[in-house]
Amino acid sequence: MATPVAQWSEALNLDYGPLDTMNRELMERLARAQAANDAELPQAWADLVAHVSTHFGQEDAWMRDTGHGRSDAHALEHRVVLNLLREGIGQIRNGDLAPARQMARELGAWFAKHTHAFDAALALHLRGHTLN
């Protein structure tokens, strides 16, 4: 079993509880997928994709509901990454684990950049809004 490389870091903390909680959960699921052996990977990957789908959907709803100005680029990144992760499900079902393993290695670095480029601005924006 590979050692997980994804770890929550306080550098990812945005001081916005709901978003920080989802981001921590994403990193936990990513770490599980990275550490999964071949038999565990299908379920770990499915759990990761399900979380990312819900997570990104929540962020997209917040942006839409509050009129966040950078929502188009932010939501586009969500769609692209989620589509790639979903492709990994099909590849795993076909017995090809290598693409999912590669995505799992790269997702942590992408996520840190995404958090600093997009989620930080969203967290700042959301602090000024009351959410349902």
Image (cartoon, rainbow, N blue to C red):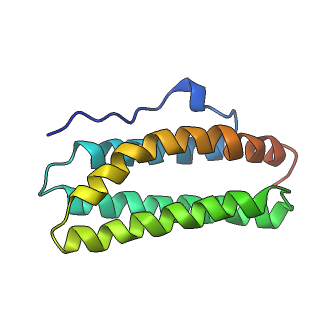
Q: Position of residue 25 (x, y in %)?
A: 46, 46
The relative height of residue 15 versus residue 91 in the rendered view (above or below) is above
* Identity of the residue drawn at 29% across and 36% down: 4
* Identity of the residue drawn at 63% across and 46% down: 19
The relative height of residue 19 versus residue 75 in the rendered view (above or below) is above
Residue 44 visible in the shown view: no
On the picture, is 75 further left or further right than 11?
A: right
* Identity of the residue drawn at 49% across and 65% down: 82
Q: Position of residue 114 (x, y in %)?
A: 61, 45
> Which image quadrant: the C terminus?
bottom right
On the picture, is 14 further left or further right than 126?
A: left
* Identity of the residue drawn at 17% across and 55% down: 40
Q: Nearer the viewer, residue 125 or 129?
A: 125
Q: Position of residue 116 (x, y in %)?
A: 66, 37
Residue lying at the far top of the rendered structure: 10
Residue 33 visible in the shown view: yes
Q: Nearer the viewer, residue 56 or 108?
A: 108
Number of on-image labels:
0
Q: What is the quadrant of residue 124 in the picture?
A: top right
The relative height of residue 16 versus residue 29 in the rendered view (above or below) is above
Q: Nearer the viewer, residue 112 or 52?
A: 112
On the picture, is 77 further left or further right than 5?
A: right
> Which image quadrant: the N terminus?
top left
Q: Position of residue 64 (x, y in %)?
A: 78, 67
